[in-house]
Image (cartoon, rainbow, N blue to C red):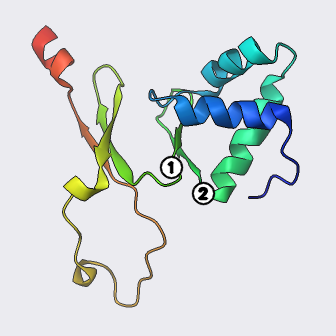
Amino acid sequence: MTMVRQTKQRAAVIDVLRSARSHPDAAWIHAQVREQLPSVSLGTVYRTLDALVRDGVVVTLERAGQATRYDWREGDAHHHAVCRTCGAIFDVDAGDVPAVPASALPAGFQVTDVRLEFMGVCPACQTQN
């Protein structure tokens, strides 16, 4: 992990992110951490998130015109389904996704990570339309 010192602020950010099931943005994480540590700054939250992304335990979910969302990945292999209507993000177990054969990739290509996003319309939005 690139974070040298494990401060109580960093531990709180990690705890909030680990327990979140909603793919939160930094502002939501900051609000949750402030309930435990009222003096924590948004900058501390962002620096912690950046370090966790560099360490590969957190991934970002980015959409044009929206705040970056964060997802705890350590030990949890999954992909995402994103509703184009409401923006909801759902986890898709990696074991439920068929493997892509190596022959589909460029010759000699070395895969270091896999991130799939399924785009569509969630059931709730389908019933509203």
Q: Is residue 128 left or right of residue 118?
A: left
Q: Quadrant of residue 16 in the image?
A: top right
| Residue at disc 2, secondary structure | loop
Tell me the crowding category of disc 1: few under 14, some 14 to 19, or many 20 or more residues within 10 angstroms, Cα based. Answer: some
Q: Is residue 3 left or right of residue 27?
A: right
Tell me the CA gap for discs 2 and 1: 8 Å
Name the residue carrying label 1: 73
Q: Is residue 69 visible?
A: no
Given the image, on which type of amino acid does mark 1 rest?
A: Arg
Identify which residue is drawn at 65% across, 20% down. 27
Name the residue carrying label 2: 56
Q: Is residue 20 visible?
A: yes
Q: Quadrant of residue 67 in the image?
A: top right
Identify which residue is drawn at 45% across, 82% down. 110
Q: Is residue 124 above or below residue 99?
A: above
Q: Is residue 90 left or right of residue 16?
A: left
65 vs 55, nearest the viewer: 55
Measured from the top left, where is residue 78 in percent x and y? 36, 50
Identify which residue is drawn at 34% across, 83% down. 106
Measured from the top left, where is residue 72 in percent x and y? 53, 43
Question: Are discs 2 and 1 less than 8 Å apart at CB?
Answer: yes
Mark before the other along the chain sequence, 2 or 1: 2
Given the image, on which type of amino acid does mark 2 rest?
A: Gly
